Image (cartoon, rainbow, N blue to C red):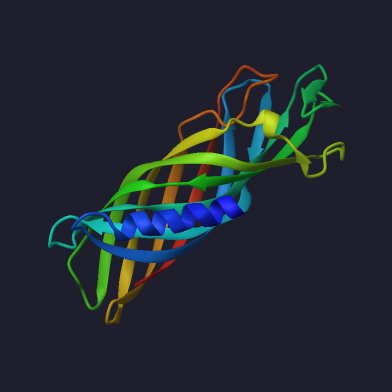
Amino acid sequence: MKQITLFTILMIFVLSSWGQARIRLSFTASPTFNWMNSTSREVDRQKVVMGYDFGLNGDIYFTESDNYSLQTGLQIVNAGGTISFRSTQSIPFAGESLPGASEIRYRLRYMEVPFNIRLRTEEFHRVYYWGLFGLSPMVNIGARGDSEDGILRKATIHDEINLFNVGMNVGIGFDYDLGGSNSVSAALIFQNGLADVTTDNYFIDKTVLNSLKVRLALLF
């Protein structure tokens, strides 16, 4: 928690001292729908699980125009997914031996620093529409798992999860001008996982984490 607080303070300092660029900050929160996709034939199905993220973002405008900006910041992401295996042999996982037909729920937490390009329209009845595209490097700061048979119950599974992850962001949304310098924003953002989130201790595969985010924000 201390690391998150210090990183947040550092991010605010960096954003507010970025040369001559104009910066607009926003607090964000997002309920999310998350699922994990594996390339292994030993994986039977993947379930969608709910999660959430929250954080501080900054839109950096390098010109007088507000139509495009570089968006970055710090997000704490709580995500994961449920994967069912159909191996004929027992599965070594997080120091336990699980039955071959096991369902595992991954509970993952990441520190995310997005880098998005945001393109915004002109004002239309106090509303601005926009789209974004970019990448989100992430560092894993929490990993727990449950198994359907009860052998694992919120067990620490750091050895089964890679430290780094990266996702590609595509989204659309709108800002509503509240007057003065304040606005509220809503968006739908799809994050497509690009990196393998698991360490492949048993299966030789690539498992990515995908998310659909309903992003709500207060801009000031």
Note whether residue 172 is visible. Answer: no
* Viewer-proximal residue among 87 and 199: 199
**Residue 202, horizontal then vertical, whole percent:** 70, 19
Relative to 189, say whether 124 is above or below.
below
Relative to 3, say whether 208 is above or below.
above
Spot the residue most to the bottom.
179
Spot the residue most to the left.
64
Relative to 119, say whether 110 is above or below.
above
Is 219 displayed left or right of 125 in the figure?
right
Note whether residue 88 is visible. Answer: yes
**Image quadrant of residue 15?**
bottom left
**Residue 138, horizontal then vertical, whole percent:** 49, 40
Name the residue: 81% across, 40% down.
148
Name the residue: 19% across, 63% down.
66
* Viewer-proximal residue among 55 and 122: 55
Is 17 displayed left or right of 111 in the figure?
left
Name the residue: 86% across, 37% down.
149
**Image quadrant of residue 11?**
bottom left
Quarter of the image that includes the N terminus = bottom right
